[in-house]
Image (cartoon, rainbow, N blue to C red):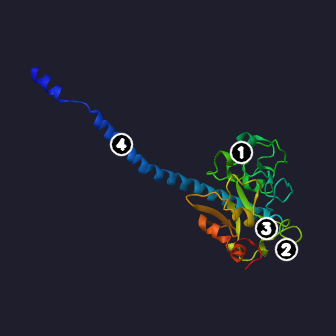
């Protein structure tokens, strides 16, 4: 009996110092692992984003096939024309008060746009400010709560719009007219703070570098339906050359 008591006395718990050392090591390990986990999550969100863009480009092709090769229009703030790929949106770029996000007119309406039926196989809905349905296809998963409030964060190249470009005649731009479609940007992943309509402006949105980054890279869909992941800095550098910008965004540029 005495022997057993001696053995039990030899088993002691951790000292306070030992527990502190274990906690410190655990904290260090977590600090090393968390960035990797965050990067892995962002990689997954970027993949979903690319898939969304691809589906929207396929929907655009379907629209063109049923409309004499005409492409949908990018749209603009509070402009609700039948060819616009989405409707509505407001001009305020960064509302300071989140309460403003719920006001009628803040969101861009996917279900009223010309691509909705082709992208979702649901009937197109007449536009009104009371539409509240959200569709994850139309927004980047990295855009957060403001992206959900915007409802649409992807932007279509504004230089494909006959209202913006006098060189585009008649009912709009035909896909077969686009020069070098493999290098012409069509959809971009815009930042929710500035995604206030369905269009992005190479001379505005792009020049101000207002894109949604995925680990310092941006997803861009091209007219021929391929998608590229481009370094954020490359888009920033494009503003230094009008020739480079035209080659990426102007439908008729070589």
Residue 34 spot, x, y in % from top left: 46, 49
Residue 70 spot, x, y in % from top left: 82, 67
Q: Check disc 3 and report the residue beneath it.
A: 160
Nearer the camera: disc 3 or disc 1: 1
Disc nearer the start of the sequence (1/4): 4
Nearer the camera: disc 4 or disc 2: 4
Q: Check disc 4 and report the residue beneath it.
A: 24
Q: Secondary structure at mark 4?
A: helix
Q: Check disc 1 and report the residue beneath it.
A: 96
Q: Check disc 2 and report the residue beneath it.
A: 167
**Outermost top residue:** 1
Q: CA distance from mark 3 to mark 1?
A: 32 Å
Q: CA distance from mark 1 to mark 4?
A: 39 Å
Nearer the camera: disc 4 or disc 3: 4
Residue positioned 82% across, 55% down in the render: 77
Q: Secondary structure at mark 3?
A: helix
- Vertical placement of 112 versus 130: above or below? below
Nearer the camera: disc 2 or disc 1: 1
The answer to whether marks 2 and 1 mark residues whose Cβ atoms lie closer than 8 Å is no
Residue 188 spot, x, y in % from top left: 68, 62
Residue 231 in view:
no
């Amino acid at each position: 009996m005495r022997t057993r008591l001696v053995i039990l006395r030899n088993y002691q718990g951790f000292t306070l110092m030992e527990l502190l050392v274990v906690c410190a090591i655990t904290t260090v390990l977590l600090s090393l692992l968390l960035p990797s986990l965050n990067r892995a999550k962002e990689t997954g969100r970027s993949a979903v984003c690319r898939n969304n863009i691809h589906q929207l480009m396929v929907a655009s092709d379907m629209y063109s096939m049923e409309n004499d090769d005409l492409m949908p229009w990018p749209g603009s703030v509070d402009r609700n024309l039948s060819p616009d790929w989405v409707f509505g949106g407001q001009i305020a770029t960064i509302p300071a008060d989140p309460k403003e996000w719920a006001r009628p007119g803040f969101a861009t309406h996917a279900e009223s746009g010309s691509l909705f039926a082709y992208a979702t196989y649901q009937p197109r809905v007449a536009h009104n400010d009371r539409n509240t349905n959200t569709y994850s296809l139309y927004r980047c998963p990295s855009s957060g709560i403001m992206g959900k409030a915007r409802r649409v964060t992807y932007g279509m190249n504004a230089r494909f719009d006959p209202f913006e470009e006098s060189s585009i005649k008649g009912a709009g731009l035909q896909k077969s007219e686009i020069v070098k479609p493999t290098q012409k940007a069509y959809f971009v992943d815009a930042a929710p703070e500035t995604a206030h309509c369905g269009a992005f402006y190479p001379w505005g949105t792009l020049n101000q570098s207002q894109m949604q980054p995925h680990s310092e890279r941006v997803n861009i869909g091209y007219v021929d339906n391929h998608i590229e992941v481009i370094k954020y800095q490359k888009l920033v550098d494009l503003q230094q050359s009008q020739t480079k910008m035209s080659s990426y965004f102007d439908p008729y540029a070589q």
